[in-house]
Each structure stands twice: as C-alpha cells, then as structure tokens.
Image: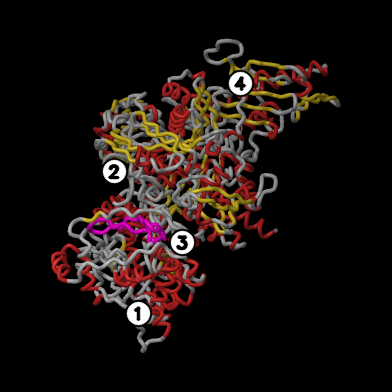
C-alpha cells in the first residue's frame, strides 16, 4: 500500500538534511513545507505540490533537483501532490509546474548544495570554489568526501535561500538531456498503484446513482429533485451493506464491487420532472442569451471609429463546441472516514482545494483530513476526480468502514465538468491597402470551477450560478493591429464546465488565427507574410520563419494552389499562437506554430490529415524527450477535438455517455507528425503541457480553406459539416438523397396468441359444444425411478433438452424444472409448472398414462385443460418409447417442493374448458407418421423438428386463435416479443440457409454466414447441445429440404457484397449512426477487427437487418446478449443504459442503410425504441 | 452464486460467484491484479484487455461463467519489471504511454497480435490497435513501441 508518511514523520528522521519553507500562516517553527531531503545514505527526495497528470513532470522535476544538487538522476525520488507532505502550490493547471513551481525546488536543491559544499570546504580545508561535485561526491584533488559523510548522524534543517546561486546553463549535465521516464517499468508490468488500485483492509465497494439532470449543476432543482428511493427493488440482492440517501445524493455500499454495481443498476428511483435546459444545439444563441458581464481586456485606438471607416468590413463569428476531458479511466477514490479523521486516496488535480471542499461537505476541520494523491488516468483539466472523493467520503461516513467508489463510464462522461463551448465574435475590417484597420474581439466562456458535486447534491453548497473569469486566455491576439479591442463576457456555466487543456486560449486562437487567414486572403497576401507584418515578438518571428523553412512554404495568395485529383483537394494551413495562462493578463507558456496538410474529399466531406508539422519554442527544455512526447500528445488530442469531438445534449441533460457517441481519434487516423523544437537553452523553461494544442483548430480550418476555398468557422469539422459547407458554396454537388424506398409499414406483431381476442367469441361457441371436461387419472404415490435403466433416463434427458422442457419450466434463478417462469401472453401471464417428481407440487403423482395424455392431448392429470403455450400440438407426435424415456428422466430428478403460481389471465381466457374447443380445431393427436417416399434422415429430422423440437411453434405465424397457420409454415413468427425469422423460402437471410450452415448453427450457436443465436433462441441452442451430431444433421437436412440450393457462386457473390459493405461502414463519412457503430460495435462486428474472445457476427449477413421490423435489432442493442447459447460465442454488453433513444435510432438507421440497402427505412423508430425500452428493467442515469 | 474455478496467470482459484460477474472485477478484486483497468465496461476502449487461451478478451464485459476452465493471462502474467515480456520491454524503451491508463490494453493487444502473427505489417499493427483508445495522445510512441516489439520478437 501507499506509504503514509507525513511532514512531521519526515522531519523527525535523523541522518538527513532537510530544506523547508515556512507555511503561509505558520504557527510554529515546525509548521513548514518540505522541498528537498538529502539523506545520509545518498538518496534524495524532492517534494512538489503539483501532481503528475501523466505528463511526466515527476521526471523533469527530478532532473532539476539532480542538476542543482549535483547528484545522479536515479538517486532522486519525487513526491507529488499529497496534502500531508507536499507544499501547497495550488492546482496543477495552466502548465505552471515547470514554469512556476519548479523554481523554489531548484533553489531548495541549490541551498542544500551550498551548505554541503561549505561543510566540505571546512572539512577538506579548501575554498568552496575549488571543489568539484560529481554524483554527491565532493572532490578536492585526491581527497573526496560524500554528501552522506557530510551529513552523518545529524538532522539538519535549512530554510530555502531564494538567493542560493543556481548553475549556469552551460554547466548543465542532467537538465536538457533525455531522461528515461521513471514510472514506466511499473506501469508496463502492473506494478504501479493508481488510485483505482488502492485496496485498504476492510474496504467495501460503493456506487452512486445520479439524478437525471446529468451534467447540470445550476438551478433550484439541483439537490431537490428526489421523490423516492424504492429499496425493495434491490432487497433480493446479496451483499448490500447500505443505501445512503442525502438530498439528491444516492449511494450504495456493498461487500463486493459487482454487487454494488448491480444494485445501482437496479435501484428504482423516482425523480421530479426536470426543467428544460437552454437549447445547446444552437450554441451561439445559447451563449448570447446567457447573462454576462463585459470586461474590457484591452483597447488600443478606437475600434468604433476605425470600424466605421474600413474599406472591407470583416465581421466573423467562430463557434467552439462542448468537449470532454475524456479520461480513459472513470474517476475513483477510496475514503476512510472515522469520527475524528478522514483519509482520502484520490487522483485529484488539486489536493489542497479538494481538502477545503471536503472540509465543507463533511463539516470537519481541514486539519483532520488527509489526502493521499495517487496517479489516475490523464485528465487534462478538472474531471470527476474530486467529485468521486466527496462520494466516497459520504459513503464511508455512513458505514464507518473504508469505501472505494468507482464511477461508471456513463457517470464520468455525463457528469464531468465539460470543456466549455465558447463563442468568439470579431467585428473588424481592412483598410484600402489591405491592412487590418480594426479588430474588435469578444469572447463568451460559460465555465467555472465546478463545485464539488456531492456538496451540490446534498445541498451543502447552493446550486447558484458562479462566474470564473477564465475566458481571457489569449483573448488578445498576438498581432499589432491598428485599432484593437478585446472583451471577455464573463458568464456562469450553462452545464457543468471547467478548465480543459488550452483553457479558452485554444478557441480564442481558433478565432484569431482563422480571422487573420481570412484577412490575408481578402488582402491578397500570403498568409505567413501577412502575419509577419503584425508580429513584433522576435521569438515568435523566429519560430514562424523557422516553420516556413521546415515545410518549404510556398507563398501564395489564393486557395487551390496544391490541386488534387478526382474528388480529393489538397491544402495546407498555418497557424501560430502563444498560450497565455494564469490570471489575466497572465504569462505566456511556450510559443507554438502549426502547419497542417489536408486532403478534403469533396464527395464525402471527409478531411484527412496527411501531415502535421509543429514547431515550439519552449525555452530551456529540462527533458527534451518529455517535451517531444508532450507535443505529440497535444497534437493528437487536439486534432481529435477539432475533427471529431462534440458533446451532445437532450432537453434536460448531457446525452453523451460513452465513446460511440463521442468518437475520439483512432490509430489509423494518426497523421505523420514532424516536430521542430527551437533550441533556446539560455531562455528560462516554459510550460509545454498545453501550448501545442492551441494553434490546431485554425491550422486545420486554414488548410481546408486552402484546399477548397471554403471557410469553416465551427467545430468539429465532421464530414457532414464539411460536405454541407462545400455544397452550400457550390464546391461539391449536392446529391439527391440516396433513393430509398418509402418507409415500410411495420407489420402487425403476429405473436403467439396475438389477436386471440378476435376469435374468442367463436371459441367460446365451439368450446361449449365440443368435448366435455375430461376425467382425472388416478394419482400414484410416486414411482421408483430405478425401474428405468440408466440408458433410458439418459435418452430421456436428451429428448427433454430437445423439447426445451427446462427452458420454460425453470424460473429465473430457480431450481431446474421446478417451474414458476411467467410466460407473457397478450391475455396475461401463464406460469410454468413444476416438472420435478414432487408428489404434492410437481408431477410425482402422475402415472405414465397421465404424462402421456398431457403430452399428446394437453390435459393435466386432474383432467384440466392445459394452455397451448405448452406445445402439446407438437409433442403429440412423439413416440411412446420416447415419451416414456422423458417420463423416466423427469421422475429420476430430485423432487423440489415448489407450488405453481396461479396464472393471471383475464376472462374468458381463465376458463380452461375453452381449450377443448381449441383442441377440436387445431390439435391432431397421434405419433409421427414417417413419409415413406422420403429418406430416413429426412424422416428423422421431421420427427425431431415437428415433434419435440417444436420449431414451428415460434417460426410459423399464428391465426387469430393462436394456432399455427398451416398454409404459412415457417414463414416467421414471434417468440417472447422477438421475431422468429422465417425458415422457408421467405427467409430474409442475405445468403440463403444451406443444410451445412443450419447444422453449424444448431451445433455451435453460430453460423458465420448468418450470425449467432440470441434472444429466446440462445437457450434453445444451449439445450440442443445434448443432442448427437446425427440428430442435428437430420434436423438441418429436414429444415433445408424445402429451400433452394445455395450455389458456391451465389455464396461467393454475397460474401463479396458483404465485404464491401463492411469496408464502407468504417469510413469517417458514415455519419452519426456510423460513428456510433465504429466506436461501440465495430470492435466485435467488423470482420477486419482483431480477434477477440467470442465470435464476430458479420452484420452484412444478419437477417434481422433485412426484416420488416427492427425489433430484434433494437432488443439486442438495448439488452445485449448477456447469456450466449454457448460460452465460446462470447457475450455482448447492453447498450440500452448508455445510448439515448435518438442515438439508437441513428445507429439502427445506419445499420439498415449500410447492410440492407435495398430495403425500405424502418418507420417510427423512435416509438419502437421507447416501447422496447419500456419493457426492459430500470435504466440508471 | 456457485463455485467457479478460474485459472489466472497459471494459478488456480475457486470462487463462489454469480455467473454474470464481469471477469474484470474478479481479476482486480479477488486476484488483486492492477494490470487490467476499468475504462468503459462496454468493450469500447480496451483498457481491460486480458488474454483468454491466448486470444485477447475485454474483461469488463466478459461474464466470468464463460471463461471457467480457460487459461487467463493478465499484464502481470506476461512479465515483471525485472524480467519483462518483449512487448513490455518495448513499451518501456519507447515510452509508449503518458498516464499509462490505456497501457495495459495496448500491451495486451500487441501481445495477442504477435501471438497470432509474429511479423505483422505496420498496417496490421495499426488495425490491431484501432479499437484501443488513448486520451493522452501517446499514439506515436505506442506505435513505435509496437514496432520495436515486432523486432524484438523476431530477434528472440
Ligand atoms: S473497460 Fe473494457 S473495453 Fe473499456
Ligand atoms: S497514456 Fe493516458 S490514456 Fe493512453
């Protein structure tokens, strides 16, 4: 486990030299923050209040300390960001670590070195200036002394000397060299303990259930919307320790993680209706209407006057969407709350701020709260890492034991404070010579610090709008325009939003750098030359020129110079920015410039990046390898944001909950990246964590313009947006929408017993005329199963499996064959009966005659009619010998006492005698009669399929009285709400079924040319595993006997078509539904995806996509395939809880168009989806 | 709940579990393994990747009942910091991670790739990793690491 040494522990140790600083409000000599400890054993420990967000700052800080102390880098350990032992240096934001917080650390190391050298000088009796130090060994001529010897047994405490001399750059040996990342060996072998991996003794597992207003934290409904938590909804689940409800905060604590997770999914919660959100599909209007306060940041000249006189007005609006931080690991925290003390293991970016928040939430003094900071998934700003700490603290307090809370993907995604949308407006213009005369810039940035969620949900902090003035980063363009004004319209968030990499600067620079490109084009000047007119900062000018050289920039004054071929147009765009961070006016981090090379497909709107060249002036680079890594990371993350990313909303909340709906860049999309690092070792080091993101959007927009002559001012540059823009500008032909057949009227569900009502009157008539109530068969007192041979019992077991006895006669989680499963019918629920040989409640009192009569005629032992949901109309075909074997098997089971629940049927269906009428009409009793004209295998197949197998009871449509339509055998039916596809020539399978594929399907539950068994077919296949190959072959032979033969050529052609459909399904231009497919489905359904445990059902072969009804497809998406027929098939997760109805509709529409292009669109998808969702269990927010 | 026998990194354990428990929870909570990570629970990101009988599997949505009796290998089962598997060594050498949360998935996916094709083309590597997400943008270094792993495997 993580060691828990506090500042006091560190200070108390002997044989060490400690460099400290007094705390801001120090209460005594020991109230200090430690920066560096040099131990007599040669180890060095450095402390920094910032945290490693996965950017490798631990390595760079270690290099700085090693350098100033003159020790080898591996000796240094860096401790980051715990409240108990690191200095409070504020949150790790704005690339400040190296630029700001490394300074005292360097001085601390220098302080230590100076004192150690003075001691050495004394010991060796030589002037300090004549000493040299190598790896902690001080040398004067032949004599040496080590730091360890100089410290000895002493406990030396020094205050930082901010005047301690630092080394000149020319003497650097460690800084500026590549240092291997110290954390990777452990990370690559599972040895590093992330916050997710913290395990403490006696720890329980927690999950939270969030309110429906996902991602919204302002408004009086926040914290006050809960109506009821129905604890009985999870009463049957094991392991639940507590359900904690405070205001709108709901948490569940359980012994095991899966128990907590299951309970959180199942818990039934009722919420008040939630007010509608501002319409965020129209960001400009939403941001203009959000109340704001203007704050003028700069005003040079008079923009009003100059603007009035411009020769060429250029007013432009640029729009930035909501983005996710998108940590790959949803936030997690462990809390141990004892009456006098709270310990929190956290991945927070701001341990000291979180401690203050927790003090408020828990009404506990800060001094009693310790935060142990561990690494988490890269966050690039404020994600839910703090929120989950509050959740864990509340749950731990409730149960008095340590609790680990893991947020789900959906919760992290929906609730993380988003990188905010932003609106940038420029009122500007050029004078007659093409110079910028006026530039009046304004920005709207609705974001704040995102108060701790648990505090809002519990009402500890009021959900009132709060304004953070963070929209001003790089709001002032880096150009010396004639008249210039920049105004930040400070505003509260609309949805939870907080800082994200390149905070406000990245959007602001998108506007500045797009606008100057537009101005250059309007002025007829090369874009780089035009920028250089207005760029005064010499380091910026150096960088821009170096970049132009690097890419052999060819000056041009109009788009289209790079040409293209066919639908492809090529372009190259430039952008430059300096990321200004911190409180306004802020400080600049590294300078950055981009050249983006793109290919735009004018037929699809797809923008492919062919190369990114990025230049950066970071001043002195502590670890150049680390800087390069950071630049790559920034480039990749930012192109993902610019091309692909956008959070979507529904009327009340965030809609985006997983990666299908929020696609991020994937490996095949990564362009070559060329990095130019300016060599400026004599300049102070600058933050490199964010700068290279900042010019991205404009560079790409400028490249698209260069390729096409069309300007895009709103992100992301998705194929749909680009295509629409190109079409509007006449660059691309607007294509008539692909000719699709008119939406099909959904066929009426032809379910089992569906429409039975229509025929009821008639049935009543027949029932009263037909056979009277049948007589009972005398009960027996049970039989001795040993009367039957083991082989008969074994045979019976196989036949019972074929008949699916256990499928219907076993309740969810119940004893096999003990009955109790509710079978839904349109008229109510029929409960299956107990088939175990229990005399009272099962069939123990049934003689074989009674059993045979039930199987043949549908009459119970007591003479009552059974309902034909029990397929005795098929079982009747079974031979006596087989019936007896089944009887023997059933009687040999262990008896289970389990009374059958009363059926819940409405009148007149509750009148069993009516079934006599039904039987008179539709039941042909008697064992199977072979067709002598047919082969033996055919007859065997027919016996199995039509008898016990009762295949047609699901796969044949039924009439108004619920009987199979003899004229439409195997034309497709319904089972438990699922469509049982046609097995006749009416089959919609893209490749017709062959005997071979039918056999493979029955044997393995999967046919590569058709797909896997799912829904109610999965348990059927599961049971069929008991049958020998010959029987399944016979069934396949019989079922295929009426089907046209499949020629190898036809099969080949169908496979080729399928391959083509699969290939285009992965293109970026597949649209929103296609992107969900790519992000959520393709990993298992694209034939090109790498093998994963389980099968890869090829959707191009799936008949569900060709059906008249989308039900099977939608059901599978909503609920997944949790229990496959056979383990080898693998399972599919349920997407119902994470995809909205409209996302599923997009996906289903895409799948239909993509894989069944000749078929009409499904109508009323939204209604069907919400209907099918209703029938599923509780869906967590 | 029933006793389920699991074989993880060569050692066997019998646990009383519900069949539908995701394998990931068992590996992390019962076997105490840190390698496989929870990222999405939906099979979308790859952070939870393990090998089942040598084939990659996404443990977050793999019901434990399906892997009973099969050989499960996690990141820890590949190698150790002192004696890393060639794929692990390649990722360390090329610094194929920033925060490293996705690293388990990347390493396991490349290990699974090399197990079925010891000399994959660059394109095959990219396609094999297509469904593994990395938010930190460590893709360049990850691809380099994967290519180094191919070379190291060839030299063995
Ligand atoms: S956590 Fe398993 S794929 Fe994301
Ligand atoms: S390194 Fe952070 S997610 Fe890949």
Query: Mark 2 and mark 3 in contact (Cβ < 8 Å)?
Result: no
Crowding at label 2, few (<14), some or many (≥20) Cα neighbours within 10 Å? Answer: some
Q: Which residue is mark 4?
A: A7
Chain of residue at mark 2: A
Which quadrant of the rendered structure holds the C terminus of chain A? top left
Q: Residue at x 36, y 26 (%)?
A: A297
Name the front one of labels 4 and 1: 1
Which residue is more in the foreground, A1130 or A531?
Answer: A1130
Query: Mark 3 and mark 1 in contact (Cβ < 8 Å)?
Result: no
The numbered mark at residue A893 is 3
Residue A657 position within the rendered picture, expressed as x and y whole percent measured from the top left: 38, 45
Q: Residue at x 64, y 23 (%)?
A: A36
Name the front one of labels 2 and 1: 1
Q: Main secondary structure of the magenta part?
A: loop
Point out the tag, 2 or 4, that comes first from the N-terminus: 4
For the question of whether residue B34 can be seen, the reply is: yes
Q: Which residue is mark 2?
A: A650
The numbered mark at residue A928 is 1
- In the image, the segment drawn in magenta is A817-844
User: Could you say whether the residue bearing mark 4 is in a helix, strand or loop?
Assistant: helix
């Amino acid at each position: 486990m993580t060691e828990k040494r506090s500042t006091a522990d560190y200070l108390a140790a002997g044989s060490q030299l400690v460099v400290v600083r007094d705390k801001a409000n120090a209460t005594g000599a020991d109230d200090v923050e430690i920066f560096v400890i040099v131990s007599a054993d040669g180890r060095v420990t450095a402390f920094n209040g910032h945290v490693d967000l996965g950017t490798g700052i631990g390595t760079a800080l270690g290099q700085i300390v090693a350098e100033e102390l003159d020790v080898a880098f591996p000796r240094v350990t860096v401790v980051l960001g715990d409240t108990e032992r690191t200095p409070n240096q504020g949150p790790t934001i704005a690339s400040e670590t190296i630029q700001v917080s490394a300074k005292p650390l360097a001085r601390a190391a220098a302080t230590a070195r100076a004192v150690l050298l003075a001691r050495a000088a004394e010991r060796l009796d030589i002037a300090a200036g004549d000493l040299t130090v190598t790896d902690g060994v001080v040398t004067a001529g032949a004599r040496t002394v080590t730091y360890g010897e100089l410290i000895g047994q002493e406990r030396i405490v020094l205050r930082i000397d901010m005047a301690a001399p630092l080394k000149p750059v020319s003497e650097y040996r460690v800084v500026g060299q590549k240092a291997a990342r110290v954390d990777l060996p452990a990370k690559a072998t599972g040895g590093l303990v992330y916050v997710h991996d913290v395990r403490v003794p006696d720890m329980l597992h927690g999950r939270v259930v969030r309110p429906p207003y996902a991602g919204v934290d302002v408004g009086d409904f926040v914290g006050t919307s809960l109506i009821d938590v129905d604890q009985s909804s999870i009463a049957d689940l094991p392991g639940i320790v507590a359900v904690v409800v405070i205001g709108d905060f709901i948490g569940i604590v359980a012994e095991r993680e899966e128990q907590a997770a299951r309970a959180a999914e199942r818990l039934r919660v009722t919420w008040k209706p939630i007010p509608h959100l501002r319409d965020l599909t129209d960001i400009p209007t939403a941001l203009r209407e959000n109340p704001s306060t203007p704050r003028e940041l700069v005003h040079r000249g008079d923009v009003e006057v100059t603007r009035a006189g411009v020769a060429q007005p250029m007013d432009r609006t640029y729009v930035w969407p909501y983005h996710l931080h998108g940590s790959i690991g949803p936030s997690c925290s462990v809390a141990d709350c004892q009456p006098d003390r709270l310990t929190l293991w956290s991945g927070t970016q701001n341990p000291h701020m979180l401690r203050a928040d927790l003090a408020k939430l828990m009404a506990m003094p800060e001094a009693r709260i310790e935060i142990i900071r561990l690494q988490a998934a890269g966050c690039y700003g404020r994600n839910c890492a703090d929120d989950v700490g509050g959740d864990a603290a509340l749950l731990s307090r409730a149960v008095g034991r340590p609790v680990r809370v893991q947020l789900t993907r959906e919760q992290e995604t929906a609730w993380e404070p988003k990188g905010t949308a932003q609106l940038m407006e420029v009122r500007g213009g050029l004078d007659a010579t093409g110079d910028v005369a006026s530039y009046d810039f304004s920005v709207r940035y609705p974001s704040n610090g995102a108060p701790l969620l648990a505090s809002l949900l519990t009402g500890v902090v009021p959900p009132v709008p709060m304004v953070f003035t963070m929209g001003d980063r790089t709001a002032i363009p880096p150009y010396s325009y004639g008249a210039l004004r920049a105004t930040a319209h400070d505003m509260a968030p609309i949805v939870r939003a907080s800082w994200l990499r390149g905070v406000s600067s990245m959007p602001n620079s998108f506007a500045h750098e797009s606008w100057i490109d537009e101005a250059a084009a309007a002025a007829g000047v090369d874009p780089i030359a035009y920028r250089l007119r207005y760029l005064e900062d010499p380091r910026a000018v150096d960088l821009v020129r170096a970049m132009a050289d690097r890419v052999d920039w060819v000056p041009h004054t109009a788009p289209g110079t790079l040409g293209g071929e066919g639908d492809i147009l090529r372009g190259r765009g430039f952008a430059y920015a300096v990321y200004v961070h911190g409180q306004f006016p802020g400080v600049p981090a590294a300078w950055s410039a981009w050249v983006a090379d793109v290919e735009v497909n004018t037929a699809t709107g797809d923008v492919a990046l062919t190369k990114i060249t990025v230049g950066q002036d970071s001043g002195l680079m502590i670890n150049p390898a680390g800087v390069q890594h950071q630049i790559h990371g920034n480039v990749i993350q930012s192109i993902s944001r610019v091309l692909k990313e956008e959070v979507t909303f529904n009327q009340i909340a965030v809609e985006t909950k997983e990666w299908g709906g929020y696609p991020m860049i994937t490996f095949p999309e990564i362009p070559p990246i060329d990095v130019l690092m300016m060599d400026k070792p004599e300049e102070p080091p600058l933050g490199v964590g964010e700068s290279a993101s900042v010019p991205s959007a404009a560079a790409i927009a400028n490249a698209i313009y260069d390729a096409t002559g069309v300007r895009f001012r709103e992100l992301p540059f998705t194929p749909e947006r680009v295509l629409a823009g190109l079409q509007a500008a006449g660059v691309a032909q607007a294509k008539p929408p692909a000719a699709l057949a008119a939406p099909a009227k959904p066929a009426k569900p032809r379910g089992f017993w569906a429409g039975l009502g229509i025929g009821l009157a008639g049935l009543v008539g027949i029932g009263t005329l037909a056979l009277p109530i049948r007589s009972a068969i005398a009960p027996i007192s049970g039989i001795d199963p040993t009367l039957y041979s083991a082989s008969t019992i074994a045979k019976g077991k196989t036949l019972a499996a074929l008949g699916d006895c256990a499928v219907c006669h076993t309740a969810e989680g119940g004893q096999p064959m003990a009955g109790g499963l509710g079978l839904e019918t349109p008229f109510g629920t029929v409960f299956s009966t107990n088939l175990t040989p229990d005399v009272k409640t099962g069939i123990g009192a049934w003689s074989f005659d009674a059993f045979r009569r039930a199987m043949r005629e549908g009459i119970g032992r007591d003479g009552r009619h059974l309902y034909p949901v029990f397929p005795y109309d098929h079982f009747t075909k079974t031979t006596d010998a087989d019936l007896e074997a089944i009887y023997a098997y059933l009687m040999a089971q262990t008896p289970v006492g389990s009374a059958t629940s009363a059926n819940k049927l409405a009148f007149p269906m509750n009148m069993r005698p009516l079934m006599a009428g039904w039987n008179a009409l539709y039941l042909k009793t008697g064992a199977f009669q072979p067709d002598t004209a047919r082969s033996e295998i055919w007859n065997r197949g027919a016996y199995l399929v039509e008898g016990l197998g009762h295949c047609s009871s699901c796969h044949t449509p039924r009439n108004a009285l619920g009987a199979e339509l003899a004229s439409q055998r195997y034309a497709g039916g319904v089972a438990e709400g699922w469509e049982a596809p046609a097995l006749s020539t009416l089959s919609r399978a893209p490749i017709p079924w062959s005997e071979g594929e039918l056999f493979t399907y029955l044997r393995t539950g999967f046919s590569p040319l058709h797909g896997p068994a799912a829904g109610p077919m999965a348990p059927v296949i599961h049971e069929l595993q008991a049958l020998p190959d010959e029987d399944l072959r016979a069934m396949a032979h019989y079922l295929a006997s009426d089907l046209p033969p499949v020629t190898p050529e036809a099969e080949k052609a169908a496979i080729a078509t399928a391959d083509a459909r699969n290939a285009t399904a992965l293109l970026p231009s597949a649209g929103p539904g296609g992107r969900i497919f790519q992000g959520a489905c393709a990993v298992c359904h694209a034939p090109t995806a790498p093998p994963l445990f389980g099968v890869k059902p090829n959707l191009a072969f799936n008949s569900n996509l060709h059906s008249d009804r989308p039900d099977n497809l939608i059901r599978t998406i909503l609920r997944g395939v949790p229990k496959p027929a056979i383990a080898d098939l693998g399972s599919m997760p349920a997407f119902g809880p994470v995809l909205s109805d409209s996302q599923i509709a997009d996906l289903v529409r895409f799948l239909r168009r993509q894989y069944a292009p000749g078929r009409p669109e499904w109508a009323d998808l939204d209604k069907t989806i919400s209907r099918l969702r209703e029938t599923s269990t509780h869906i967590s927010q | 709940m029933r006793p389920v026998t699991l074989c993880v990194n060569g050692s066997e354990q019998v646990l009383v579990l519900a069949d539908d428990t995701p394998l990931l929870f068992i590996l992390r909570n019962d076997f105490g393994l840190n390698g496989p990570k929870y990222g999405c629970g939906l099979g979308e990101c790859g952070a939870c990747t393990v090998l089942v009988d040598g084939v990659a599997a996404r443990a977050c949505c793999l019901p434990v009942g399906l892997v009973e009796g099969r050989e499960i290998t996690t990141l820890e089962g590949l190698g150790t910091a002192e004696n890393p598997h060639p794929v692990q060594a390649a990722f360390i050498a090329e610094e194929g991670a920033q925060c490293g949360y996705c690293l388990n998935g990347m390493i396991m996916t490349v290990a699974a790739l090399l197990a079925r094709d010891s000399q994959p083309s660059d394109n095959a590597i990219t396609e094999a990793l297509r469904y593994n997400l990395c938010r930190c943008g460590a893709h360049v270094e990850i691809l380099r690491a994967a290519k180094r792993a191919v070379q190291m495997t060839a030299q063995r």
